[in-house]
Image: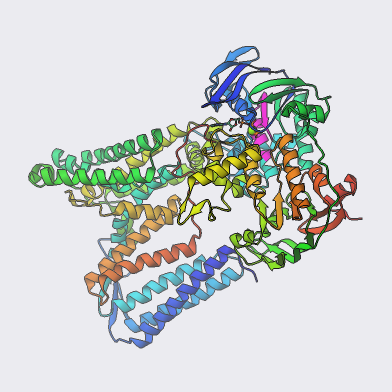
Amino acid sequence: MVFSNTQKRQLRLIAVVLLLLVVELWEFGFAKASSNKTTFGFLLGKEWVIIHEWVIQSTTGSKIFSGIGILAAVLGIFLVRSNKSPLPGTAIAGFSLLMSFLCWAANGKFIPMTGLLQGSLMLAVPLIFGSMSGLLCERSGVINIAIEGQLLAGAFASGVIASLTHKTTWGLLVAPLAGALISLLLATFAIKFSVDQVILGFVLNVLVIGLTDFLYKKLLIPYSSTWNTGPSFARLEIPILGKLPIVGPIFFNQTIIVYLMYAIVALISFSLFKTKWGLRTRAIGEHPEAADSVGIDVNKLRFRNVILAGLVSGLGGAYFTVGSVGSFSKEMTAGAGFIALAALIFGKWTPMGAVTAGLLFGFADNLSGTLSIIGVSIPSEFMLMVPYIATIIAVSGLVGRVRAPAADGVPYSRGSH
Amino acid sequence: MSLELNAITKSFGALIANDGINLAVNDGEIHAILGENGAGKSTLMNIVYGLLQPDSGEIKVDGKVVTINEPSDALAVGIGMVHQHFMLIPVFTVLENIVLGHENTSKVGKLKLHEARERLMKIANEFGFEIDPDAYVENLPVGVQQRVEILKALVYEAKVLILDEPTAVLTPQETDELIEVMKRLRAQGTSIIFISHKLREVKAVADRITVIRRGKVVATAQPSASQEELAALMVGRPVNLMPDKNPPKVGAPILVVKDLEILDPSGRALVSDVDFEVCAGEVLAIAGVQGNGQSELAEAMVNLQSHVRGSITVGGVEIVGKSVHESLHEGIAFVPESRELNGLIGSFSIAENLILDTHREAPYTKGFALSPKAVAIRGEEQAKEFDIRYQSIQDPVSSLSGGNKQKVVVARELSRPVKLVVASQPTRGLDVGSIEFVHERILAERDAGRAVLLFSTELDEVVALADRIAVMYAGKILAIVDATVSREELGLLMAGVKK
Ligand SMILES: Nc1ncnc2c1ncn2[C@@H]1O[C@H](COP(=O)(O)OP(=O)(O)OP(=O)(O)O)[C@@H](O)[C@H]1O
Ligand SMILES: [Mg+2]
């Protein structure tokens, strides 16, 4: 039997998961037997209750989940062999792998599952905003390394304006403009003057970090009561949806910024593949000469999309301030813009892929936080690392070779063939 | 619709690509433009289509002066163009490529593809084109991509259609189909500007011929003129269209291919049961309709294919399983089928492209560093020998005209001491003068005792160069025949009919 490259990749992934499951089964189920119980909590707020919590003997849990996982992985292999997508198998196997690990890691302790997931979404929000910004740029053929700067500018502007006006709405309105301002610089130099886009983005990040640091020190700290004590949005529970068990508190009891994010993601996924704008955007990112030859103004559309992208990531920046704590602090985006870029790439430059990768990264981040809070006996640095490595394995196994838009980062001018 | 160009001039730096060109295309006429590589044909057409701005001169449509600043202006007055290098987006479907730039949308901005699909299918049926509107362009063979390009122009009712070397990548059958399409369009009143280096086609279809040399119109001719006359007008000297061939002095086998099988990534056999030998001092031509496994077979000679079983030996050394670099090192010169894809690095200079294969060696590399001076000197020498027309040897190779790019590849590959020359469509896009030159070079390689494996879909070329001809059909070698075989028999073999 000959397997295609995709199938080979799928099989390799399943093999790795299978191996880890067997190790878990042995290590957690037999070698490190413990009589403690693990408790999973499923309640967060006032949602309708199905289960409160779920208590299981840690060793038994590990055994059961590893067992289920191994069966699922075997199912996955059969699916590949019969030329079907192994996704159901791999998904269950991956989930079991995680649960088996949690049963063991949290033995004798309590894991707030709903809270864990809600927190993951909250950490993923800036990543998703950022990756949508990157998507808009790169699909049109402009590399955007300046997402970090755009997020930070948005965070700064919204924090300061909300503080000065005492209105969250003003903060929310100003943030996109700040992001767009960075985009304006990016677009002007990248598109009009063909400056190397990676270097340009890097410089813009340094510029924004330097500028906000400076203003923070000279203005926001000394006069913090006027400049840096902004209000923030309260959570807004959506009727009925917000009451659903588990999903309710995770997705439908969030601030307005998160709901805006849903709308933006939906709008971009629809527009990119179903509208005239989307068709043209993808065209200029793949083969600008061809787009030009049918009368599309390549550089104008690129310019517009880069500005749009700035609006999106600027808005994402507001999440750091008016979307959560209210006040601005130095370099508070802490690299989210770069992780967003990674999410975009791992998501194969597709909106849904980027969102999935963003959520995975958010989950990874939050899991390590949660585990170190409940006091698991693994060094937290290691915990911080493992989920990313797992994500990389999963992504390389699931999505395969990643192909950037063909003209990504290549300035367009006529007559250069 | 009639089109008139008056005194069009365009220069790139010091180079005058178009020098006061006058051209009149009448209503419903097929007007052929002939000219050497780099004569300025594509430049002129890009000006008409709004992709380039002339330094001076005017364009008249139906007697009225029009300003064409953008392709959209050209489209608006009814000028359509099929470019020398395809303007298709590989990751889009056929239909998406067709609607791009002319999208219909619903009130909320959603794309409406329905009408375009119907229009496309109607026109495709009218012209007898078989086309799947939902196929991705990157998965289509070049001949079909070409059809998509033409459909693009037809769907938007071009009144003047510019075809810039549309037949360069087509098989003879596809070319015949295209000629039929052109005749039907002419009957419907469409004017066509047809650029080609293949005189046979030009004679078959053109109503009038304009010849351009070094940016100037040097002559107009009638299609009744002989091929030799047309060739001489183009190049400015008599051209030998059929190279003189010495009788072969066949030596020992150099290339031995045994039980070769090439699979695609999903395990389907693209080429199977292939056995043949090429001896020193002979040319074996692999003929066949494009898409019967020749491309894969050619690539396998230097290990550009990844799933190969069987054996390929060059001078007794096994090639299968080696790296591309190692295979070339066994003494193979390789002219790939697609110069853009596998032959050149567009952003590198002409000089750098000329030493891509030998850049590791002295005098180009000293210690760790490349010596730009040695590279430039070598580049200029080779460019002179192969008559490559350029402005500066340091210009990116992508600025060359199509035919001159091809010459860069041929020059590089034929300037190395080798045992075996593998050449895939070596004269694709070349003008008659350059074809004569490349043919002479290939025969000189043969006479110098090298084995030559030629892949060509051009029957003329196969007959002119080959000592023996292997015909490929459906991934297998159907027959190996002597070069004296009749064209009819060759045609039948290529269609898969074996007596
Ligand atoms: N953008 C450019 N910059 C510099 N030189 C150019 C550019 N475009 C074309 N040229 C030069 O102008 C000349 C005419 O090129 P053109 O592409 O019009 O030739 P052509 O007649 O179409 O040749 P071919 O038959 O090989 O396609 C060539 O010498 C080419 O190198
Ligand atoms: Mg040309």
Q: Is residue B280 visible?
A: yes
In the drawing, does residue A246 fall left or right of residue B388?
Answer: left
Magenta stretch encompasses residue B103: no
In front of the other: B183 or B281: B281
Write the residue at 78% across / 58% down. B280
Is residue A226 shown above or below A14?
above
Residue A138 position in % (x across, y down): 43, 45
Q: How is the image coloured?
A: rainbow
Left or right of B250 on screen, residue A71? left
Q: Nearer the viewer, residue B384 or A251?
A: B384
Does residue A383 sit above or below B222 in this rendering?
below
Camera-nearest residue between B478 and B12: B12
The image quarter in which residue A183 lies: top left
Q: Where is residue A56? Give x, y as percent.
A: 32, 80
Which quadrant: the C terminus of chain B?
Answer: bottom right
Look at the image and say whether residue B148 sits in the magenta stretch: yes
Q: Position of residue B3 (x, y in %)?
A: 66, 18
- Specify the farthest residue to the right: B499
Magenta part of the chain:
B146-165
| Residue A318 percent coordinates (x, y) | 25, 46
Decide which of B88, B430 is in the foreground and name it: B430
Q: Quadrant of residue A62?
A: bottom left
Instruction: Please name the residue shown 28% across and 81% down the image.
Output: A37
